Each structure stands twice: as structure tokens, then as C-alpha cells.
Amino acid sequence: MNATFYDSRWIEPPEHVRVSANGGLPRGFRAAGVACGVKPSGGLDLGLLVSDSAATTSAARFTRSGTLSAPVLLTMERSDLFALRAIVVNSGNANAATGAPGLEDAARMQSEAAREAGLGDDTAVAVASTGVIGLPLPIDSVSAGIAAAGKRLRASGDTEFAEAIRTTDAFAKRVCQDVMLGAGTVRLCAQAKGAGMISPGFATLLVFVQTDARLSPQTCDLLLGVTVKRSFERISVDGQLSPSDTVILQCSGASGVRVEPESADELRLGEALDATLRQLALMVARDGEGARRVCRVVVRGGDGEAVEAVARAVANSSLVKTALYGGDPNWGRISQAVGMALPGAAPVAVDIAIEGIQVCRRGAALPHDARALADAVQRHEVEYEIGLPGEGAETELFFSDLGHEYVTINAEYTT
Amino acid sequence: MNATFYDSRWIEPPEHVRVSANGGLPRGFRAAGVACGVKPSGGLDLGLLVSDSAATTSAARFTRSGTLSAPVLLTMERSDLFALRAIVVNSGNANAATGAPGLEDAARMQSEAAREAGLGDDTAVAVASTGVIGLPLPIDSVSAGIAAAGKRLRASGDTEFAEAIRTTDAFAKRVCQDVMLGAGTVRLCAQAKGAGMISPGFATLLVFVQTDARLSPQTCDLLLGVTVKRSFERISVDGQLSPSDTVILQCSGASGVRVEPESADELRLGEALDATLRQLALMVARDGEGARRVCRVVVRGGDGEAVEAVARAVANSSLVKTALYGGDPNWGRISQAVGMALPGAAPVAVDIAIEGIQVCRRGAALPHDARALADAVQRHEVEYEIGLPGEGAETELFFSDLGHEYVTINAEYTT
């Protein structure tokens, strides 16, 4: 029964994957989430996740922002990204634009988490923060939270850990599943939060993935790199890049199931990871700004640069996004966004189809069933297909709409 | 009395310019606007503007969209852009994404306007259309409108011409003024419409400028090129590029006042044109999406590429724009947008000031008077100053906020 997690027509879960209704982390992992007082609401805001296996391998990816948060700077520079044993996260404050004091606070979080996790070496800990930018981290509260979380660590702690990393997400993004490999069954869990920069000062995509399969650091890094490119790099909520985005994959090896490079099992685990991250990414887009609808835009033809530019221009167009929100079959805005992405290239003989209904061929309007189109754009998932002259390149992007909820969330609450 | 037109602290009208309360086109020009039935509202939707002087010189600038509208394609390819005598414009339909039939319709508009203007040569006519994308132009209505407009042409027709080019602009953008040059006084008039792509399928910036000064085509082109770069290329409403943007300057020479290259009068006329276009551009930004506020962002330091990227990232950030709308002093979003514009450059030691109140120094939050800041961001015009490491480069950009009115206009009406 994969339906509870894999609920989109766009994501096909592999047959060798079974979502676990009961949850529970992969062997070797423990986690906890506590409330330490950073969030004014009093909700869970401090998460700790630990692998007890000394053979743990890992890989990480971060935002490319030029104004990196203190925890991202610290983790990139002072952690062993291939052997991360523990992750400490707070929500409610991003510890970004906080200068040298912010770096000291992040270092203290790293050090205290290492102690709670029973690790001798601070470099085995990754630090993440999400929330308001530009306010000092209340480090004493965070410190007390780390101590409290250390005492609560347990194998079933993933639910509260996932809760503690949330800011304004409308629903949890979390999965536990079993992956049947040739060499045995392994568990694959993931917790994600965020929908871009969606709320007043609250930012960030955070994704943590754990498995008890045994992978070399190189294999771990390869699988994460490929699957992140096909998932979290293919979504846009509001086109905004956070200073805090962090994705980490940890492999405890505690199942004893070894996944060798270029093996069939590497492929099978990769397929499972790919479906997991794509579904999570889609959920992040869907949760963006209290969105009504999510759209998949597929662009084919031209070259790689052109399809990417067109997909981004369509996904980030406030005109396309408001039309998506309004259920308005206004394909002229798609045509306009295509033109914007390809300056100086006119006339571009673009093809446009919405939910399989072709509305524009070689740059010119095409008669179509307007009633069928009006119905199609009312669905929760809407697909645009855009064809450019030439062939060879293809890309996709998932994006959410832009509606009153976005404005309300982002304009009407003040920091 | 320049106050009625020049109403921003950011635009300083030259002392040798006097706004005319009565209006009236420069000598040699006649114009008209009529209703021909393209707009469902029955409003004025067809404008014709003609210079009766055979010595008329002109210059033009167009959108760089890859999906150019038919009239833009036609005008760029088939008109003599240095000797445009007449302009024919319709609103209500953009004649874009209309293929070969659209080009035929644009050619028919050009030819019929030439006849009504008494011109032997179609290439002396520029064509522009603004409105819904992807619907066939009702050419018979437009044709009847051109004939009707031809009969109404008169020196005081600029008001109705300006009305006929509007789509959903909340207020008219139009000026008539006298410019005192050393060699005599000339008149300078302009009519503008549009605020980016703001309404369902309605697009486009259109700007038409007339003077009775006598300029060579080269001088005309130089002045327009320089002043467009400092005005209409420095605004953003929703970051969207229209397939139809058109700016045209016509000089009838009918005043007999000759403006020579590299003369003091060229400078004085250039200053007047610069202030005019900057004020019009600001008005376009201010009218965008029924905006509450307009912001000027100034970026200094770094190099030319960096300041431009940062200014665009801030002006097009939906998070910055919703904060501007909400009167929210959330400068963390400015910091985040800066980081997004400078990928891989972390840590960037950015300075940020809002209305002169410094909130961030060298990348770190700075204590400031929160109450003064909260008051400052409530004003109708708000200024952000951003400093990047290094010196030498500087740019500015004007942009409007993003609020409920934008969503309502763009999502809740269907085409």
C-alpha cells in the first residue's frame, strides 16, 4: 500500500518498495524532537538525530546562496560530510545574517550535540537552523533543548524529529519504507520541511534521509547527487533561494546489507531514493504558500540551456502562477513566459499543450475545445507541455500557484 | 508648476522645463482616439497619431521577447524606424501568438493608417497592439476604427489618443511640456500605458513621445536609447516581459528649432526627455497591479554585473514585494535575495539600509530603531540601499509591491 505516500500520477513508486504504516527509523538510528522555546508558539523546535554505528557514511548538499546561514557555513567548513553521525536542527530562527556571534552559536550547537550523541568528534555533527533571518539565536534555550533531546533519543523518534524541523508547513512530509534488494531488505526513511521561503522570515528546505544499507561514502554521494538533481532542484514555490537549504543522506550499514558500486542493488536503492525524493519535492511544492494547485511543466526540444530557461520562466512567472491559482486557461501567459526566456530569438515556433489539449502550434493559436480546457485547469495537478524547435533536450519542473494565501502569509503578519 | 506631473522625490525636473496645463501636441502633430469595438467595455481602443511634416525623424525601441507580437515583428522588419510619420495602435487584443494571419492583419493596419494619414508609403507607419494574447484580431472592426480616427485627427487629440492605448491602467500617464532651449522653445509630449503584464492577457508597455524640435535621426536615436536605459529599463512590476513593448520618439522639426549633435541644446533636451521618461516609468511602476507602494532599490559596490543581478533579484522577489505591500520591515528577505543573486559567493559582506536606517552591516544584523523603521516602510515611496564589497558600480531599480489586488486582477477574472 504505497498510496498513502505516493499519491501523485507523476511519481511511480518502484515495485520493490513498501511504505511502512508504522514507521520507525532504520536500524542504527535514534531521533528526538523537543520544545525549547525558540518558536513563540511553544511547538517542537529542536530536533536531534543520531546514528549509533561507527561505520556510518553520509553525503550532503547545500544552498548556493551568497549569504549562507551560520550553520550551513559551519557544516560545510567544519564537518566531515562523508561521515556525519548526528544532525542537530532548530526551527524558529535561521541563525542567518548573524555574523561572528552566529558562527559561535552554531559551533556550540555542534559541540553540544556531539556530546549528547556520545561522539568524541564535533566534525561528525551537522547543524541546521530554519526560521527568522537576522535575529540572534537564543542559544541558551537551544542548548537546553539539545540536552533534553539527548535524553529522548529513540528508534521511533522520527515523528517528533520531523515535527521539530517544521516551520509553517501545512502538513508533515515524512516516510518510512522497506526496500527489497537482492542482498536483503533495507529501510529507507526521510523527513522534509519547508516550501521555499514561504512565511515571514521563515525559510528553507531541510531534508534528512536515513538508511541502514551499507554504502561507501562515494556511492552515498553519487546517489544523493543524482536524485537531488531530479527532485529538489526541479521544484519552485516562489523562485526564492534560502540561505539555509540542507539535504543530508546517512547510511548506518546496520542492516548488514551491502550495496556495491554499479550493482543491481545500487540501481534498485537509487530508484527507491529517486521516487522518495521526487515525491517529497512534489509535496513541498504542493504545500507552498497554501497552494491550491501544483503544476508540472515539461519542456522538450531546443538545447539544454533553452529548455531549462523556459521551464524556470514559466514556473516563476507570477502571471502563470496566478492563472494556475484562478483555474484560468490563459495560455497566452505561457507563450509570453517562453518569449521572455528566449530574448532575441523571435519568432520562436513554440508548441503549447495543457493537460494534453494543444492550444498553440508553431507559435500560433490553435482552435481547441475551450470547455474541456477550462475543466482541465481546475484539477489539483495540472500539466503543461511546451515544445521548442529542435530536439534532444527535455526537462520538467514542479511549481505551485500564487494566490491570496501567499500574500496573506507573507504580507499581513509582521515580524 | 511641474508638481502635477513631477510628483516624486526621486525625479528632479530640469529648471528649463514647464509642464503645460492645457496640453496640446507639438507643432506638426495630430492625433485621435476612437472606440471600434475591440474592448468589450466599449471604451476607446483605436489610436492614430500623425506628423504632417515630411522632415520628421524618429527612433524606436522594442521588447526583446522571443515570442514577438505580429505588430512588433512587422514594424521592426517593414517600417523605416528613423522616419516614422504615423503610429496606429489598438488596445484590447495584442495580436500576439497569432501566426501568419496576425502578420497580415498588422500589415493591413499599417497600410490603412498610411492612407488615412495621407502618406504614400506604408513604411512610414508603426503598428502597435496591446491586450489579450492568442486571439485573432477583429480586423474589420479595427479597420473601421482607423477610418474613423483618420477623420478626427487634430492637434488636441493627444488626450483621447492616450485613452485609446490604455488597457487596465488605473490612471492616465501623459504629459505636455515646454522645453526652453537656447535656440528657442520646443514642445515635448508623451503618452504611456501599461504596467508590465498586469491583467488577464492584457500586456505591454507602450510609450509614444513627440517633439517639434528638429533632430537628425542619429541624435533622435541616441537620445531615446540613453533615456530608455535610464527609465523603462529600470522598472519592474512583476518581472514579466511582454511580447509587445514599444517606445517611439518622433521629431517633427516644425518649431524650426534645430538641436545639433553635442550642443548645449542637445544636453538640455536630453535632460528634459530623461526626466519625462523616468517620471513616466515611475508612474508605470506605481500603477502596477493596483500597487500600494513603490520602492527604489539602489545597489552600490561590486561590479556592474553584481549590482544589476542584486537589484533585479530584490525587485523581482515575491517575498520582498509582499513585505513592501504589507509595510513589513523584514530586511532578512532583502539579505536572502542578495544571496540568491550571488550564488557561490558566500559569505558576502552586504550592507542594507531602509530609508536611511542601516539594519545590516557586513552581512550581520545591526541594532537599529525598530519603531522608526516600522514607520518608514509605511510610506508610499520606500528606498532600499544595498552595499556590496568593492566600489565603482551603482544602479537603481523602481518596483511595485505584490498584494491582493494583483492576485485578484490576475486570477479571479477569467479570459
Image (cartoon, coloured by chain):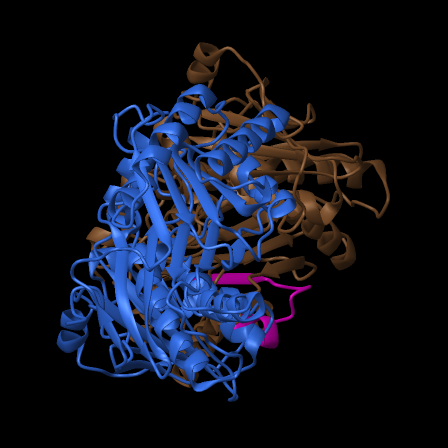
Chain colours: A brown, B blue
Instruction: Look at the image and tell me in which quarter the N terminus of chain A lies.
Output: top right
As rendered, which of B188 and A116 lies closer to the eye?
Answer: B188
Does the segment drawn in magenta span residue A332?
A: no
> Which residue lies at the image location 57% right of the left edge and 64% below the top edge?
A64
- Residue most toward the bottom? B391
Q: Residue A337: give x, y in percent of width and height.
A: 53, 42
Going by the image, does B8 lie left or right of A2? left
**A362 w.r.t. A88: above or below:** above
Does the segment drawn in magenta span residue A73?
A: yes
As rendered, which of B71 and B236 lies closer to the eye?
Answer: B71
As rendered, which of B11 and A5 lies closer to the eye?
Answer: B11
Residue A121, visible in the rendered structure: no
Q: Residue B364: give x, y in percent of width and height.
A: 38, 81
Where residue A396 sits, quadrant-wise, is top right
The range drawn in magenta is A72-89
Instruction: Look at the image and tell me in which quarter the C terminus of chain A lies.
Output: bottom left
As rendered, which of A360 and A64 lies closer to the eye?
Answer: A360
Residue A296, visible in the rendered structure: yes
Going by the image, does A10 lie left or right of A105? right
Q: Residue A306: give x, y in percent of width and height.
A: 69, 46
> Which residue lies at the image location 44% right of the left edge and 35% below the top edge?
B116
**B195 w.r.t. A135: above or below:** above
